[in-house]
Image (tube, rainbow, N blue to C red):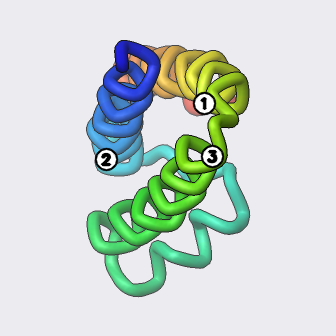
């Protein structure tokens, strides 16, 4: 249960940090998510998370908990990356 909760919290953290980074002048690096953003920033992020949550639900349904744990590692790194982008943008350094 903790793995699933961590997954959901990381998704929320990704949405928040991505919104902040984009608002500060950052650019979405994931090509699939960037395509979703054409419908609106928040709407696109939510749509991407709905797709991701559907995949996670399937993984849980088929007892693929290792996949969720690996996704947690990846999204933990993504959230840290987003935070680093936010800091760099706040400091005025626009290089990736």
Pick the residue in front: 17 or 5. Answer: 5
- Give the number of the mark in front: 2 or 3: 3
Q: Residue at point 40% right, 42% down?
A: 18
**In the displayed structure, does residue 21 sit left or right of residue 59?**
left
Disc number for residue 59: 3
Locate residue 24: give its quadrant.
Answer: top left
Q: Residue tagged by mark 2? A: 19
Classed neighbour count for the residue bearing mark 2: other residues with Cα under 10 Å, few (<14), some (14–19), many (≥20)? some
Is residue 93 among the parts visible in the rendering? no
Q: Secondary structure at mark 3?
A: helix
**Would you say the residues marked 3 and 1 are in contact, meaning their CB atoms lie under 8 Å apart?**
yes
Q: Compared with residue 54, is residue 74 higher up or lower down, i.e. above or below?
A: above
The answer for how far apart the CA atoms under marks 1 and 2 are is 24 Å
Disc number for residue 27: none
The answer for how far apart the CA atoms under marks 3 and 1 are is 7 Å
Is residue 37 among the parts visible in the rendering? yes
Locate residue 7: give its quadrant.
Answer: top left
Q: Residue at point 63% right, 46% down?
A: 59
Q: Residue tagged by mark 1? A: 68
Image quadrant for the N terminus? Answer: top left
**Would you say the residues marked 1 and 2 are in contact, meaning their CB atoms lie under 8 Å apart?**
no
């Amino acid at each position: 249960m903790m793995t699933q909760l961590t997954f959901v919290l990381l998704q929320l953290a990704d949405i928040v940090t991505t919104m902040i980074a984009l608002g500060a002048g950052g650019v979405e690096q994931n090509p699939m998510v960037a395509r979703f953003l054409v419908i609106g920033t928040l709407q696109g992020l939510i749509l991407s998370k709905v797709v991701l949550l559907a995949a996670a639900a399937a993984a849980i349904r088929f007892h693929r908990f290792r996949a969720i744990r690996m996704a947690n590692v990846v999204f933990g790194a993504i959230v840290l990356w987003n935070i680093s982008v936010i800091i760099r943008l706040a400091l005025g350094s626009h290089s990736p």
